[in-house]
């Protein structure tokens, strides 16, 4: 096809005002005028002739360079490829006067992969198209993708052409996210300080009331508490963009994925810790949680369940604490999912948050993953708790009549409607604060259930299936937390493996006592007679008395006893401690002789010496 460079100017005849063109006498001067190019293009689909023209080059060399670029583009399709020639012609015909000539290598890649040469899609447009095409996404994953795209990716990258996205663009986005995080931290700190100052101002006095009103107005004008975008969330944002661009690469629309080459700081998973006595004391002193993920000890979990025993949703709290259900799974359980005969519960549905035109709503969805659809076994206590929950539902249904919402759920609100998972978490937080126990999240009950099962010796595969994990590695790495008692037992067992001399032996423990010698020891009887049975520290006094008796009479030590005798010694020591509430109850009975015994009681029985008196005691459930 014909093409050329030529020199021209825009001088006009002073009389006619017509362009002089090549007749301008000044064209003989080297610096007068400029160079232009013109290249004939393949005809359009309609058969119309067209050409590529551009002017304003200061030298013929630069003009020729651009003309060579145009000719190189025209040479990409073969002479027999009429469709390809038309595509290249469309590309050059769409280039504006001041637009750069398309890059040869970039155009070659697009041309060879069948991509559009004239349509330049932006990151925002592509993310919308990609997300709309994800038909098989579960609701939870789709919500997460939607938040990543709507809140982060489109505001920062939506205007950039997809084929021109680079790693520096992503570096700028994550730097902006960190800058926003700093602003959020500062705003949260100011609001928190203002709330603490408000709490410290007395209510009485005109001056104090005026200060409180002014501070309340200042707090109302502050932005609400917001969450920062942590490193784990930043990694998920990166993963969302990488997945979207990988789809474009698979379709042959893109050749480079910038999201695969951006570097972020590692997202360290917070280590879960138990609320030991030391952690609780430090938290009460400073108000700071030792870790974002905290787990209750079995004793604290029992206290919590006693506290909420009369709560309408006690069944939900119990099932999550014992069987480790996810929040949405507990809300989504249906009556038909429970098999009363074989004591099982099928996890087939869950309730999840979803974005609607009016904000956020709740909808029914399949479990989080394929392995989340499972059948879990119910222990006898949990089975009875569910029976009690259903009985209360039936009573409430009869009370409300037509006002009852028959949703068929195993756990409902007091009018039978669905439980909003967000409300369930908020209600859990409210009850935890009211109970006085150290704070945990609702999801941390699931952590505790996993740890209890593993500490009880349940096989990791069974624990993984109960929790709905596809791999036991997830169960062990994320949800297994060693109970302090189990860790102590392991440490003691390890220490006993190494033989030591007499001088290096530690003071005897309760488990190293010869039971027969202890119970017949005058030294122990003398110490026991001095103890105050009414003292709150009687348990500690009793343990000290046992150890002191052994130190005063070394023959009481079980160092030469057989393993069976040592085990019996541990049982005797624990039985002695268990006598504490019994003997104190004897005293109370003497003071209140003739009172009727409490109803619905249970009694100490485990490891109690034969012939010991057993006194019943109340279950201890407290109304929430």
Image (spheres, grey):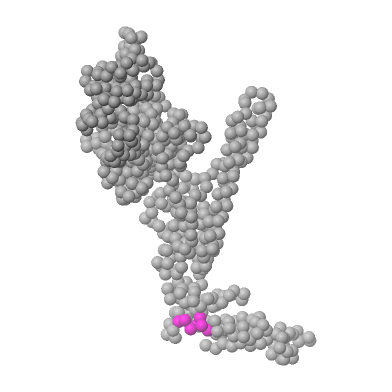
Please, is residue 596 above or below residue 85 in the view?
Answer: above
Residue 513 appears anywhere in the view? no
Count all numbered tags in the image, as a single digit. Answer: 0
**Left or right relative to 506: residue 176:** right
Of residue 117 and residue 463, the one placed in the foreground of this image is: 463
Of residue 275 and residue 305, the one placed in the foreground of this image is: 275
Location of residue 576 (image quadrant): top left
What span is colored magenta in the figure? 71-77
Query: Hey, which residue is sitting farthest right in the picture?
Result: 15
Residue in view at x 28 percent, y 39 percent: 499
The quarter in which the C terminus is drawn is top left
Please, is residue 176 above or below residue 457 in the view?
Answer: below
Residue 531 appears at what percent x and percent y? 36, 16
**Left or right relative to 138: residue 107:** right
Residue 365 appears at what percent x and percent y? 36, 47
Location of residue 59 (image quadrant): bottom right
Residue 145 appears anywhere in the view? yes
Q: Tell me, yes or no, whether the highlighted magenta stretch contains residue 50.
A: no
Q: Tell me, yes or no, whether the highlighted magenta stretch contains residue 73.
A: yes
**Left or right relative to 431: residue 31:** right
Please, is residue 371 above or below residue 488 in the view?
Answer: below
Residue in view at x 37 percent, y 27 percent: 306
Of residue 197 and residue 388, the one placed in the foreground of this image is: 197
Residue 21 appears at what percent x and percent y? 69, 88
Residue 249 appears at what percent x and percent y? 42, 67
Residue in view at x 42 percent, y 35 percent: 275
Of residue 327 and residue 75, the one placed in the foreground of this image is: 327
Location of residue 495 (image quadrant): top left
Residue in view at x 52 percent, y 52 percent: 151
**Left or right relative to 9: residue 463:** left
Query: Hey, which residue is sitting farthest top in the picture?
Result: 594
């Amino acid at each position: 096809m014909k093409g050329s460079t030529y020199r021209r100017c825009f001088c006009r005849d002073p009389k006619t005002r017509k362009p002089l063109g090549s007749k301008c006498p000044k064209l003989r001067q080297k610096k007068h005028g400029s160079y232009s190019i013109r290249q004939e293009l393949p005809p359009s689909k309609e058969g119309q002739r067209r050409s590529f023209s551009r002017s304003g080059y200061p030298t013929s060399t630069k003009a020729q360079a651009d003309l060579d670029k145009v000719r190189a583009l025209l040479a990409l399709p073969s002479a027999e490829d009429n469709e390809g020639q038309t595509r290249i012609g469309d590309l050059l015909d769409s280039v504006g006067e001041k637009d750069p000539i398309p890059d040869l290598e970039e155009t070659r890649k697009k041309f060879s992969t069948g991509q559009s040469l004239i349509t330049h899609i932006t990151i925002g447009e592509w993310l919308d198209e990609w997300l709309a095409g994800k038909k098989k996404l579960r609701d939870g994953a789709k919500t997460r993708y939607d938040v990543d795209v709507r809140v982060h990716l489109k505001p920062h990258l939506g205007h950039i052409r997809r084929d021109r996205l680079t790693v520096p663009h992503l570096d700028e986005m994550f730097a902006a996210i960190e800058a926003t995080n700093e602003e959020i931290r500062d705003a949260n700190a100011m609001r928190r300080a203002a709330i603490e100052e408000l709490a410290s101002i007395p209510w009485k006095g005109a001056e104090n009331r005026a200060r409180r009103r002014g501070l309340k107005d200042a707090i109302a004008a502050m932005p609400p508490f917001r969450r920062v975008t942590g490193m784990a969330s930043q990694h998920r944002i990166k993963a969302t963009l990488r997945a979207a661009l990988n789809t474009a690469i698979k379709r042959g629309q893109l050749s480079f994925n910038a999201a695969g080459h951006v570097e972020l700081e590692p997202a360290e998973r917070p280590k879960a810790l138990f609320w030991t006595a030391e952690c609780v004391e430090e938290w009460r002193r400073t108000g700071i949680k030792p870790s974002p993920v905290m787990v209750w000890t079995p004793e604290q979990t029992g206290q919590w369940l006693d506290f909420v025993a009369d709560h309408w949703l006690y069944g939900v709290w119990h099932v999550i604490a014992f069987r480790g259900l996810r929040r949405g799974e507990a809300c989504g359980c249906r009556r038909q999912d429970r098999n009363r005969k074989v004591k099982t519960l099928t996890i087939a549905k869950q309730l999840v948050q979803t974005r609607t035109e009016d904000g956020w709503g709740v909808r029914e969805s399949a479990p989080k993953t394929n392995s989340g659809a499972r059948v879990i076994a119910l222990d006898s206590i949990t089975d009875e708790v569910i029976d009690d929950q259903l009985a209360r539902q039936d009573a409430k249904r009869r009370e409300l009549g037509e006002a009852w919402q028959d949703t068929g759920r195993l756990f409902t609100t007091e009018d039978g409607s669905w439980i909003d998972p967000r409300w369930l978490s908020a209600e859990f937080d409210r009850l935890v604060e009211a109970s006085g126990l150290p704070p945990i999240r609702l999801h941390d009950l699931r952590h505790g259930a996993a740890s209890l099962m593993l500490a009880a010796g349940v096989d990791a595969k069974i624990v993984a299936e109960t929790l709905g994990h596809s791999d036991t590695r997830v169960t062990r790495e994320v949800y297994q937390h060693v109970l302090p008692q189990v860790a102590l037992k392991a440490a003691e067992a390890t220490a006993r493996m190494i033989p030591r001399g007499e001088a290096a032996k530690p003071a005897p423990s309760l488990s190293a006592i010869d039971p027969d010698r202890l119970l017949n020891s005058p030294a122990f009887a003398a110490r026991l007679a001095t103890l105050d049975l009414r003292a709150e520290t009687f348990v500690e006094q009793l343990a000290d008395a046992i150890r002191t008796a052994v130190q005063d009479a070394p023959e009481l030590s079980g160092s030469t006893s057989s393993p069976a005798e040592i085990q019996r010694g541990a049982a005797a020591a624990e039985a002695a401690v268990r006598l504490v509430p019994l003997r104190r109850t004897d005293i109370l009975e003497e003071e209140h002789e003739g009172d009727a015994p409490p109803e619905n009681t249970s009694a100490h029985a485990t490891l109690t010496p034969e012939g010991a008196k057993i006194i019943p005691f109340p279950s201890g459930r407290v109304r929430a």
